[in-house]
Amino acid sequence: MMEIPSLRNETRYGVPAADKIMFNRHYVLGYSYYFRQAKWALEIVSPGLSDLERADSFRPDYRIAEIFRADLADYEHSGYNRGHLVASANQFETELQNSETFLLSNMTPQHPDFNQRVWKNLETAVRALDADPKVLETYVISGPLFYFDTEIKTIGSEDDNGVSLPIPHAFFKSILTENNRGSLRMWSFIIPNEASDQELDAFLVPTTKVEQYSGLFLWERLVGSKITGEKKRIRKLWKI
């Protein structure tokens, strides 16, 4: 993989591989032409303190060729939500910043009970972590997981003018925090794309497991035995 320079703060600790890497104003996204959705989305949590209203401006991303691009019609009557990878509430300092999270390139088909419960709970918990006075910055990378020994269902059109979207079996989220002394902490989750009443800590996994399941090398600019150990451990939620 060609080295991507750290042009943006989000990419300071690495950028995984993707068919198309898209530098948005407030987050970076790696797109998969094969799956017609993002492989990953990378952000620094920035919830802000404004009184802005959620944009809800769902729209196609016209930087992606039509044959690989999702459209609003692909989600209609599908029974699946347009699930954010970069959470809307994580990017809330300006109207444009929030609106950018509603590009369909940042969306992936999520079961409603997953999207509106356990995934939302995790997003809220990450913002609470970011609000800890000991945390200087919170980096988050999220993406879909597909298990190739399990049937993959799709939504969307299959005719000549439409795109069929595979439904992920699960999702991952890996969180990296840095304090004002430069110390790093890491947590990673794999959560099935279905309803669940389990507590968030039931979905904690070693970061190495996310890498194996996703085929992505996460935080690859961090090297050394200490980071290798951090990637292999399951840290308690949220033990700073």
Image (cartoon, helix red, strand yellow):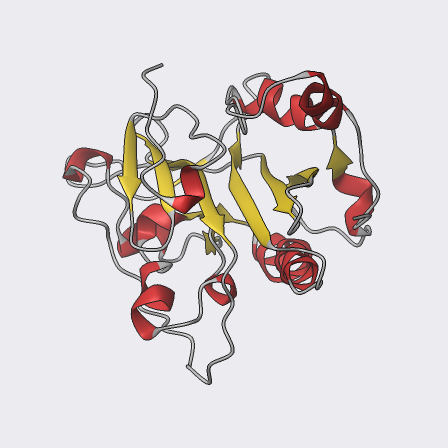
Can residue 199 be seen at all in this image of the molecule? Answer: yes
Residue 29, above or below 217: below
Asked where in the image residue 229 lies, by quadrant, the reply is: top right
Q: What residue appears at the point 20 percent right and 40 percent down from the top-left corner?
A: 64
Residue 117, image x, y percentages: 66, 60
Up/down of 70 relative to 217, above or below: below
Which residue is pictured at 18% across the width and 34% down the height? 67
- Quadrant containing the N terminus in the rendered view: top left
Q: Where's residue 133, x and y in %?
A: 70, 64
Quarter of the rendering containing residue 211: top right
Q: Nearer the viewer, residue 119 or 218?
A: 218
- Nearer the observer, 46 or 189: 46
Task: Say above or below: 226 vs 120.
Answer: above
Residue, far front: 181
Residue 90: give x, y in percent of width and height: 51, 62
Residue 95 percent coordinates (x, y): 33, 74
Relative to 99, 238 lies left or right: right
Q: Is residue 85 visible?
A: no
Depth order, front residue of 145/43: 43
176 left or right, relative to 225: left
Q: How many marks?
A: 0
